[in-house]
Image (cartoon, rainbow, N blue to C red):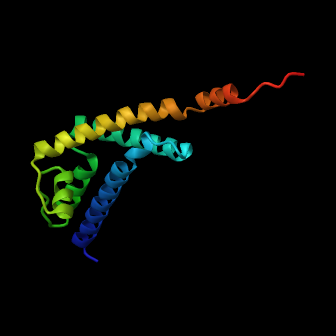
Amino acid sequence: MSSQSLFRGVAMAIDWTHALVMIAWGVGLPLLVWHRFPRISRAYMWFAMSFVVLSVVSHEILGECFLTTLARAAWTSGGGFRERVPFTVLLTNAVAGIRPSTRAAVLAWEFAVFASSLGSLWCWHKTHPRRRGSELAARTPVKSA
């Protein structure tokens, strides 16, 4: 196996991981407001908060997602070419066959980060263990002796 094919395999793995994490983040957003299964909502809340923090910090430091930077470096090392556009643009183009502008992709990302942040706060408030315990205590009738 040549080093070029190794780098291309690594780049492809990073791109697939990036796509799956973004899809999981987007598909799971309703769990932040729908709490039929509080443990799942709370686990997703932690995932969403981690995703948002990593994403925002990465954008502040690198100007893009760190996974996009890593994948581009691997594609370049493997002899391939990676356009200097956000990964979300490339993913949207691959999936839907449309090519949004970089500005549109950034605005969509910013809106999704904002929605995820608000949803995480709401989920934290509604599923917090202490809150649930006090609600249960308030609902339980007190037996008189």
Q: Quadrant of the C terminus?
A: top right
Q: Position of residue 32 (x, y in %)?
A: 43, 40
Q: Quadrant of the N terminus?
A: bottom left
Horizontal side of residue 56 vs 48, given as left or right? left
Front-lying residue, 129 or 138: 138
Task: Determine the residue positioned at 45% across, 40% down.
Answer: 45
Front-lying residue, 20 or 11: 20
Task: Determine the residue positioned at 43% across, 39% down.
Answer: 33
**Residue 77 drawn above or below residue 41:** below
Front-lying residue, 143 or 55: 143
In which image quadrant can residue 144 be found?
A: top right
In which image quadrant can residue 112 be found?
A: top left
Horizontal side of residue 76 vs 49, given as left or right? left
Q: Residue furthest bottom?
A: 1
Q: Position of residue 85 (x, y in %)?
A: 13, 51
Front-lying residue, 93 or 60: 93
Q: Position of residue 48 (x, y in %)?
A: 40, 42
Q: Residue furthest right?
A: 145
